[in-house]
Amino acid sequence: MAQYEKHLRGDFNQLLRLCENAIMQNSSTSSYEGGSSWYSGEVSMAVRVYERYSMFGKNRVSLNLTLVGNKEELFLTAITSGGSQAVFFKINTFGEDAFLNTLIPAIEDYARR
């Protein structure tokens, strides 16, 4: 498992689109698996699940993205899983780290604006 969290300020829908584009455009095998959105007053929440094929591990890796916004205050958490072929413990997390790293630069660029 690899995890990334970030508090930042901005537009909820703009950041969500940025995340979706970064994940889908940075890997030819990325796929959107499902998601859910919830809105209540000024609070917004989106949960998204993506998968991609890991060449190194020769298996599928998932990335779960949760974005919560209250006006311009945003919190994002992205967690990857899968990618190991071991039965009782993880041998490698290379595929998980690589998948997460398709997202992190876009978030960091957004945070610097």
Image (spheres, rainbow, N blue to C red):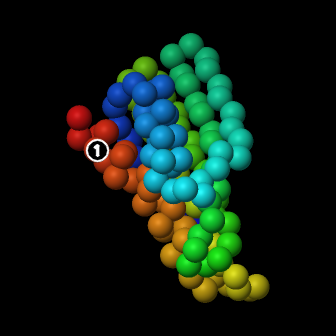
The residue depicted at 55 percent of the width and 71 percent of the height is 95
Which residue is rendered at x = 51% and y = 76% of the image? 94
Residue at the left extreme of this rendering: 113
Identity of the residue furthest to the front in this view = 28
Q: Nearer the viewer, residue 26 or 96?
A: 26
Counting labels gives 1
Q: Position of residue 18 (x, y in %)?
A: 43, 37
In front here: 90 or 17? Answer: 17
What residue is at 39 percent from the left and 53 percent from the top?
104
Q: Examine the image and state in which quarter residue 79 appears.
A: bottom right
Depicted 28 relative to depicted 69: above or below: below
Q: Residue furthest top?
A: 41
Q: Is disc 1 placed on a helix, strand or loop?
A: helix
How packed is label 1: few (under 14 Cα within 10 Å), some, or many (20 or more)?
Answer: few
Please give the residue where the numbered disc 1 appears in the rendered image: 109
Q: Is residue 74 left or right of 55 when viewed as pictured?
A: left
Place of residue 24 in the rendered image (x, y in percent of width and height, measured from the top left): 53, 47
Q: Is residue 37 something one can see in this rendering?
A: yes
Looking at the picture, how far across and down is residue 78, in whole percent?
52, 52
Residue at (61% x, 86% y) in the render: 91
Quarter occupied by the N terminus: bottom right
Q: Nearer the viewer, residue 70 or 84?
A: 84
Q: Label 1 is placed on what type of residue? A: Asp
Q: Nearer the viewer, residue 56 or 81?
A: 56
Q: Quadrant of the C terminus?
A: top left
The answer to whether residue 93 shows anywhere in this view is no
Relative height, residue 98 to residue 86 (above, below):
above
